[in-house]
Amino acid sequence: MSSTETPKAALPAMTHTVGMPTHHKIIFVGLFAVLLILPFMVYPVFAMKLMCFALFACAFNLLLGFGGLLSFGHAAYFGMASYVCAHAAKVWGLTPELAILLGTLTAAVLGLAIGSLAIRRQGIYFAMVTLAFAQMVYFFALQAKFTGGEDGIQSVPRQDLFGLIPMRDDTSFYFVVLAITFGGILFIYRITHSPFGQVLKSIRENEPRAVSLGYHVNRYKLMVFVLSATFAGLAGATKSQVFHLASLTDVHWTMSGEVVLMTLLGGMGTVLGPIVGAVIVVTMQNYLAYLGAWVTVIQGCIFVIGVLLFREGIIGVLQKLIKKSL
Amino acid sequence: MFELLGVPPQVLMGQLLIGLINGSFYAVLSLGLAVIFGLLNIINFAHGAQYMMGAFVAWMLLNYTGIGYWPALILAPIVVGAIGIALERTMISRLYKLDHLYGLLLTFGLALIIQGLFRNYYGVSGLPYAIPPALQGGQNLGFMFLPNYRGWVIVASVIVCFSTWFMIERTRLGAYLRAATENPELVGAFGINVPRMITLTYGFGVGLAAFAGVLAAPIYSVNPNMGADLIIVVFAVVVIGGMGSIMGAILTGFGLGVIEGLTRVFYPEGSAVVIFVIMAIVLMIKPEGLFGNNA
């Protein structure tokens, strides 16, 4: 029962090639093509919700799948960014791009503050510390004036993009969300396939060896933590513009649990896993909402089955079958 | 009547009492987490759900079978502990060779299932559970009024905490347990059935949570969500104390409860977050926890 063993050790080694492997290029182009026509096939708000959660899960996966750090408090960055973005848009009348930027920056600063404390502990303590700090953020959101307590920030306006392009129509805003989330996911992909990402992987696989090779392990951990929090914030801020709403749901620990579930279900440490996981979990919540608390039970069952029977997740199983990293 | 920093002594004592009561629950729950972690090396995320189950089993015993508080105080921990043992045998035991994080994820899933099921059948409004007749009323201590039941909660928690401490630190069984925490293979080689000891330890830790749940039932209403938020605070307590020492878990639990109570007197807005702030400070000064010895 050594604590250095990581959950991802069983994954096939990702081949390190210069540039994007061909099958990844095909996947991303195909995904983009599907996303271009998606708002004409499904309700655009639902499509935007899917994309925001896909980005959120990818941001979380950056930390867990590539950094090997299990944060149980990612709702803090997601939710806080959503509050700040909503406040900026509603009270200060900022345009969407500035409001989202401000929300994202808030998440980055929060991530820096919490991350620098949390990386002092490892493994399950790290998970507990991040969860506890996220709960602190939740209480702050519950009590602070600007968050509106139980009501949240409602009917948040969506100003014209750059002050020029009208965004009242959901379909036009869809393409902004597409640019943000797809860009975010590509950026995360780039991070994980950079030299920085390789160092992260080496820390995940064997931290003492990375130290002995002269890497400042804690600096790398903090950097990936802040990056992950930032992208989680980007997703949360965008979501508050999509729904015209920021509420306590986004900052509650159940949200932290959901993003863990998405990543576990799709496949930790894979490129596509979090996206697939997010789509499944969000769709399930959407169509099974009438079941009420049974959704929680189903989510719990997926957790239990996932941990006991298929820890690689859907994409993890798939990439074993086709022997290619996905 | 004297006043302390502008606060009347009744208010101060009243909040101190609430603090001690919360501290009792922190202590019993973090003790259970520490005992389980010591031998199983997993963080039992379902601990809050099992605490809630303890309260519910007491409520069910009373409402479906007419069994009252005192038998429930023994029966509920046994029932919930037995369920815990079943979970350990069928699921948790499969994860011991894997990374500790999987234990956390599995028990988180179990907690979701348990809470979801209870929410389905009992709603979220909370069910009342009366204080047992023998403990109704209270004592006038001159400087404050002490409800009997609240006094009993503190006494019972202290007794349970110190019995557990005594059992682990001062008896032969506890010596086996501590030895198995250090080196399970070696203890197994001496002919002690370590897997069974692990199972019973999990059952015992879960039983402690259920015991706290029964104690809590007459104070807070019996509610499917009662454990969910509490367990996060208990995690912070565990991070502050470190899980290396049984006595450390007990003292940290009571101490933080009192600090929280005092905060409610002098700075009410901060009472919900004071434990997390202390956690941040401890992480800065002594990251391994006040009584911790492992990173």
Image (cartoon, coloured by chain):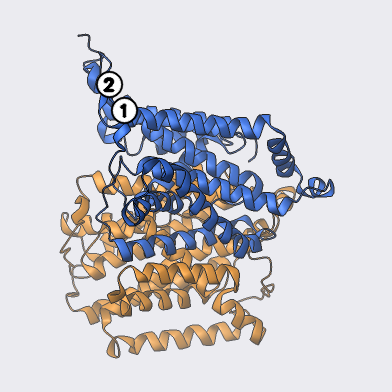
Chain colours: A orange, B blue
Badge 2 vs badge 1, beta-carbon distance below 8 Å: yes
Label 2: chain letter:
B
Q: Determine which quarter of the picture holds residue A308.
A: bottom right
Residue with the mark numbered 1: B148
Q: Is residue A256 above or below residue B19?
A: below
Q: What whole-number distance in Å separates the C-alpha atoms at marks 2 and 1?
A: 7 Å
Residue B213 location (% of width, % of height): 41, 45
What crowding class fits label 1: few (fewer than 14 Cα within 10 Å), some (14-19), or many (20 or more)?
A: some
Q: Is residue B285 above or below residue A125?
A: above
In the picture, which quadrant includes the N terminus of chain B?
top left
Give the residue at x 36% y 61%: B118
Q: Nearer the viewer, residue B15 or B177?
A: B177
Question: Could you tell me which secondary element the residue under label 2 belongs to?
Answer: strand
Q: Nearer the viewer, residue A222 or B185?
A: B185
Question: Could you tell me which secondary element the residue under label 1 belongs to?
Answer: helix
Specify the label residue B32 is tagged with.
Answer: none
Label 1: chain letter:
B
Q: Nearer the viewer, residue B47 or A161?
A: B47
Residue with the mark numbered 2: B139
Give the residue at x 69% y 74%: A12
Q: Amino acid at mark 1?
A: Asn
Q: Is residue B95 visible?
A: yes
Q: Amino acid at mark 2?
A: Gln
Give the residue at x 18% y 70%: A160
In the shown orientation, is residue A159 left or right of residue B29? left
